[in-house]
Image (cartoon, rainbow, N blue to C red):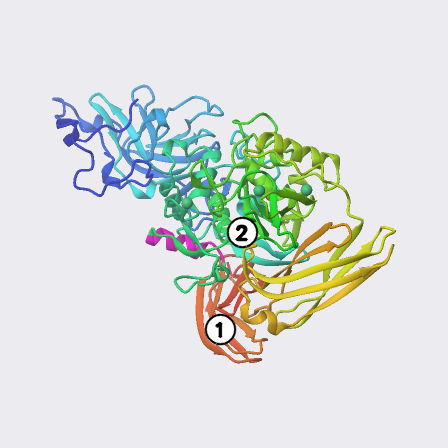
């Protein structure tokens, strides 16, 4: 069988372009205009004596596509706010065809067809004629007649577990002596085919039902941020089932550089997804910005979830402003879950960015011990968020399937584009960075050593100190079925201090270093002075204390010169401004210890503070007698006030409720141009409200009405954003009951 045939016009002049005078549609667009694909075989002149009534004529096709009907329930697609049939591949579904007369298997021949894209071809899997078979065969498309009743035929259709996913056009074709008679295009019969983590033959198969429930079906997540000693959480609305979101995700695939024939492969989809979620190179979904000026868009911390971003991108086709790592990861998670690929958002604390691909984080100090910001190109982010997607890896040796890192935040190019992954988490752990894609970069993020080198005036560099445990201190994701963290650090690396951890690093260096070979490891003489660095509770707008502790383990008397510098930093580790700089002299008797307190005053840092309210302290200490250098860095994330959310009303589906969002300004100055947002999947679309001014210590209050659409545990998420205060969140869990009268 061949694909739908050319139209009459094309038959007359086969060389005529197919879309003359129409908007050019790139060949990888799946959602072709309906009139661009012929809907019926043309007969030319009907043969003499031919009577259409002799042949089967399709009168109606029933798809059983209501949320409460079998197909959507059994395929776990009843939550999608979408009235078309949505099925998951590799799993049977049922349809019924009504003909003009009873079907006679001796005489009549018909079949169902699925078609996607502009130029459907059977060999590419974009034109799928489904044979009627006696028995369905796992792994193949087939349709089996299960029931005949008067003029109706009921079919069970099985799709191939590796077929293309997307939105297909559906036809019923009947064979007549003069050709194929095809039903006309009916948008209501369009059928979405998605990945199927419940299907053993699908490459995204996941064994544990509880994991699928979390990683595919949960439409609200928790993002961990802040810093390792003060982990902050916020909820994020993935909203993969909300109205229009499935179409928006398919639109994103159309915008990606991926031929339709590759759209059954989660490796390809997640790789191109990591490229198209960011705006770089391809005018993808989200424009990143890290400079604290968001006047041309929405500040990254103000979003409550993915839905508004995806809808805006679908309607404008232009990058949505602005995102930072958790926004890229949040939207990417929606995209993956929406298509049926299990996905989760993870946060890596002290995430290294290895700029020069030597698998180590290089920090250069001047001869006097201060960081040389010109030479130091690598950076360490307080935290960095990315995604893991679950899939088999038939392209790698056995054992590297399962969770794969994919990262849509534009950090480094990979084969010429800003994209990253999929990289096997297992390969990262063992240092097998030779396995594609981008495994060395992610290995560095979680387990590179920090190598502190002194840059001498003559241009030479001397390794002073190697910190083997600072990078990748903790890796978290949301726990299954709850809102707390699950520590998954041990999936990415062996425990610090173990032989295995060193072996993995050596393997990574062997496989992955493109440039110079590392020469610092021989310089491992342990300094005989220890330095520790602590801070007490630091609340936004208040004073706090930094404590340095020195311990002399030698039998000599030492004098120590220490520099303590405090910078305002972006969470990416990029320094914005220095707010303090102290020079300390400490004398240490043999075998003794000493602590030094440094008071940090609010008025020193407040005026320069940026969004994430992070302070970065860097201390370098020189033992004057031995010339040894000790170095440490520490991030202090200041605690910001919360938003309070209350509700009024009963919590019953279809009944109006009120949400009240409140905020009290804790700062010693008034806040201006404040934007509040609130949203809740299944409860309300995002609403925003602007307040011109909130004076010191006064409280703003905002009320919005909504009508819950879905039963069960739901969540309201709110954000507050203004130039002098960002990352202010609030959330509230509520339970929506069904209407008792139903
Ligand atoms: Ca891009
Ligand atoms: Ca490096
Ligand atoms: Ca390490």
| 662 part of magenta stretch | no
Residue at 37% x, 34% y: name it.
260
Residue at 62% x, 63% y: name it.
566
Q: Secondary structure at mark 1?
A: strand
In percent of width and height, residue 62 lies at 36, 39
In percent of width and height, residue 379 lies at 57, 49
Badge 2 density bin: few <14, some 14–19, many ≥20, Cα 10 Å: few
> According to the image, label 1 marks what residue?
703
Q: Quadrant of residue 735?
A: bottom right
Residue 316 vs 51, above or below: the answer is below
> According to the image, label 2 marks what residue?
374
Which stretch did the figure color magenta?
Answer: 305-316
**In this image, 58 relative to 403: left or right?**
left
Residue 367 vs 206, above or below: the answer is below
Q: Quadrant of residue 495?
A: top right
Q: Which quarter is ligand 1 in?
A: top left
> Within 8 Å of ligand 2, the CB of disc 2?
no
**In this image, 392 relative to 111: left or right?**
right
Q: Quadrant of residue 494?
A: top right
Asked if residue 451 shows in the view, the reply is yes
> Within 8 Å of ligand 1, the CB of disc 1?
no
| 312 part of magenta stretch | yes
Name the residue nearer the viewer: 351 or 9.
351
Residue at 58% x, 59% y: name it.
234
Residue at 59% x, 45% y: name it.
458
Farthest residue to the front: give it: 458
Cβ–Cβ under 8 Å for marks 2 and 1: no
């Amino acid at each position: 069988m061949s694909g739908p045939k050319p139209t009459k016009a094309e038959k007359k002049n086969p060389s005529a372009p197919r879309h003359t005078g129409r908007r050019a549609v790139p060949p990888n667009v799946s959602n072709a205009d309906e009139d661009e694909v012929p809907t019926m075989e043309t007969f030319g002149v009907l043969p003499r004596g031919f009577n259409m009534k002799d042949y089967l004529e399709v009168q109606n096709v029933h798809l059983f596509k209501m949320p409460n009907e079998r197909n959507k329930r059994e395929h776990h697609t009843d939550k999608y706010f979408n009235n078309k049939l949505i099925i998951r591949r590799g799993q049977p579904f049922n349809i019924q065809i009504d003909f003009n007369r009873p079907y006679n298997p001796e005489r009549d021949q018909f079949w169902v067809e699925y078609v996607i894209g502009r130029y459907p071809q059977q060999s590419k899997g974009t034109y799928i004629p489904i044979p009627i078979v006696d028995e369905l065969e796992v792994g193949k498309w087939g349709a089996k007649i299960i029931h005949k009743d008067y003029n109706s035929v009921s079919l069970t259709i099985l799709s191939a577990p590796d077929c293309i996913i997307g939105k297909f056009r559906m036809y019923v074709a009947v064979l007549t002596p003069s050709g194929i008679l095809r039903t006309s295009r009916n948008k209501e019969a369009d059928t979405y085919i998605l990945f199927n983590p419940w299907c053993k033959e699908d490459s995204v198969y996941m064994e544990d039902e509880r994991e699928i429930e979390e990683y595919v079906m949960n439409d609200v997540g928790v993002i961990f941020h802040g810093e390792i000693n003060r982990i902050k959480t916020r909820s994020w609305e993935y909203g993969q089932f909300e109205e229009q979101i499935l179409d928006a995700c398919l639109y994103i695939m159309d915008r990606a550089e991926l031929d339709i024939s590759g759209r059954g492969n989660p490796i390809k989809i997640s790789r191109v997804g990591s490229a198209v979620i960011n705006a770089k190179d391809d005018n993808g979904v989200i424009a990143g910005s890290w400079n604290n000026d968001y006047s041309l868009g929405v500040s990254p911390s103000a979003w409550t979830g993915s839905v508004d971003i995806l809808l805006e991108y679908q309607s404008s086709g232009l990058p949505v402003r602005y995102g930072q790592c958790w926004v890229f990861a949040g939207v990417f998670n929606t995209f993956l879950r929406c298509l049926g690929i299990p996905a989760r958002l993870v946060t890596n604390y002290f995430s290294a960015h290895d700029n020069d691909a030597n698998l180590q984080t290089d920090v250069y100090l001047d001869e006097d011990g201060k960081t040389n910001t010109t030479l130091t190109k690598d950076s360490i982010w307080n935290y960095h968020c990315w995604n893991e997607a679950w899939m088999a890896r038939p392209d790698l040796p056995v054992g590297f399937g399962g969770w794969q890192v994919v990262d849509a935040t534009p950090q480094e190019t990979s084969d010429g584009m800003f994209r990253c992954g999929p990289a096997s988490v297992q390969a990262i752990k063992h240092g097998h960075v030779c396995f594609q894609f981008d495994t060395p970069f992610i290995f560095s993020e979680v387990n590179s050593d920090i190598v502190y080198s002194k840059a001498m005036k003559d241009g030479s560099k001397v390794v002073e100190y190697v910190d083997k445990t600072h990078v990748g201190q903790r890796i978290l994701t949301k726990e299954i079925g709850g809102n707390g963290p699950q520590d998954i650090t041990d999936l990415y690396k062996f425990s610090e201090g173990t032989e295995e951890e060193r072996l993995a690093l050596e393997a990574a260096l062997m496989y992955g270093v493109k440039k110079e070979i590392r020469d610092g490891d021989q310089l491992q003489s342990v300094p005989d002075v220890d330095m520790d660095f602590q801070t007490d509770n630091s609340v936004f707008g208040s004073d706090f204390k930094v404590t340095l502790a020195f311990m002399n383990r030698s039998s000599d008397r030492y004098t120590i010169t220490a520099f303590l510098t405090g910078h305002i930093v972006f969470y990416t580790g990029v320094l914005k401004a220095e707010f303090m700089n102290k020079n300390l002299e400490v004398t240490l008797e043999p075998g003794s210890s000493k602590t030094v307190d440094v008071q940090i005053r609010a008025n020193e840092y407040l005026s320069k503070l940026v969004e994430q309210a992070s302070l970065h302290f860097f201390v370098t200490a020189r033992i004057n007698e031995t010339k040894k250098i000790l170095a440490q860095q520490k991030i202090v994330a200041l605690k910001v006030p919360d938003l309070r959310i209350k509700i009024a009303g009963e919590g019953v589906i279809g009944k109006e409720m009120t949400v009240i969002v409140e905020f009290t300004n804790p700062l010693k100055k008034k806040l201006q141009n404040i934007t509040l947002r609130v949203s809740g999947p299944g409860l309300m679309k995002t609403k925003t409200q602007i307040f011109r001014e909130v004076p010191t210590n006064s409280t703003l209050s905002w009320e919005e009405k909504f009508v819950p659409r879905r039963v069960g545990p739901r969540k309201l998420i709110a954000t507050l954003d203004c130039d002098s205060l960002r990352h202010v969140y609030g959330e509230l869990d509520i339970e929506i009951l069904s209407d008792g009268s139903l």
